[in-house]
Image (spheres, rainbow, N blue to C red):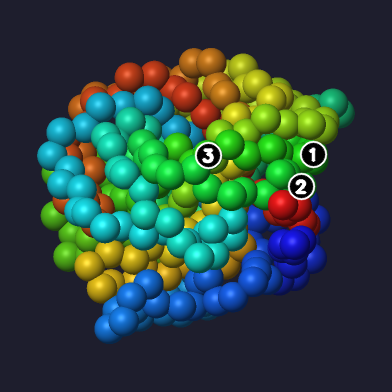
Amino acid sequence: MRVRLIPTMRRPILSATGVLALAVAGTAFGATAASGATARAPVPTAKVPKLSHQLCYTSAAKGFKIPAGVTLFDAFTPGGFTPKIGAATLNCNPVAKTVKSSTGKTTTYPITYPAGHLACFSITGKTLKLPKFITVANQFGKGMLFPGQPDYLCLPTWKSLVRPPHNKMAEPPFLDHFTCYPVKSQGKFTVPPLILRDEFGKSSPRVSNVPTQLCLVTKKAVHGRIFKVVHPGGLLVCFPVNKTPIRNPVYDQNQFGNARVTIRQVSVLCLPSVSSTATP
């Protein structure tokens, strides 16, 4: 069976933020996970900012409380799956990216949602049947990605550099959950000279042209509650980064509670991307 991902509108790749509509078998993003489940109120689409780039760091966190029975639904798993969720080992900041062309022109892709951070938890579970590959395109190029079994669940997260957040809402409302898959790639991605600026500082790192992670927007069901997708069809493709500034400690708040987080080192730069097909 061929799973086709259809864009909601056509945009040039250099200005796209990866917002697509997924046409998948069944009703993966609309169905409830269990009888009697309730859905979080839909986010008004007119207020939803485009996906930002994310710069992710390896980290260690103390304080999160992970509930049992979390079920995830994405474009690869419309029927859902229930992983075992481990520690939070990645922490991501929205990041502005400035690119310098061969002619010397610079273009900056700003942060679209400054509050929208991600805390990513390791996941394991039974082997899932996944598409053989997915075709993607972003500002670095295009190619085919061959996914392995999912290894991270990323939660939308408030972050503070000075004290624990105490927001009334558990998570930033205009950012998705993501399920991330390790990938091998085939295609041509070219990383131009660039400058990154997040809340930790400014840098001009080396970024690999070989992507290592694909993250799909995800519907999450837990304890009868449904957390819907905010950017239907959105996805991030992540490339390894060598060195950027860090700050310690930082403080997170999301649906799993509050945590004090130690940032270790930069890991990947994740680009909003678009896709056309996924083939089982």
- Viewer-side label of 1, 3: 3
Q: On screen, 80 above or below 28?
A: above
Whether pointer 3 and pointer 2 mark residues with C-beta atoms closer than 8 Å, the reply is no
> Gap in Å between the C-alphas at discs 1 and 3?
19 Å
Q: Earlier in the sequence, mark 2 or mark 1?
A: 2
Q: On screen, 5 above or below 95?
A: below
**In this orientation, which residue lies closer to the viewer: 267 or 147?**
147
Q: Earlier in the sequence, mark 1 or mark 3?
A: 1
- SS label for mark 2: strand
- Residue 143 numbered tag: 1
Query: Could you tell me which residue is drawn at 49 percent across and 43 percent down?
Result: 127
Answer with the quarter of the image where residue 7 lies.
Answer: bottom right
> Gap in Å between the C-alphas at discs 3 and 2?
17 Å
Circle 3 is placed at which residue position? 149
Count of labels in the image: 3
Query: Could you tell me which residue is drawn at 36 percent across and 48 percent down?
Result: 83
Circle 2 is placed at which residue position? 135
> Gap in Å between the C-alphas at discs 2 and 1?
6 Å
Q: Is residue 231 left or right of residue 210?
A: left
* Callout 2 amino acid: Thr
Query: Could you tell me which residue is drawn at 26 percent across and 58 percent down?
Result: 69
* Callout 3 amino acid: Gln
- SS label for mark 1: strand
User: Residue 118 location in percent, x, y?
Assistant: 38, 45
- Mark 3, Cα crowd under 10 Å, few <14 / some 14-19 / many 20+, is some
Q: On screen, 229 above or below 102?
A: below
Which quarter of the rendered picture does the N terminus lie within?
A: bottom right
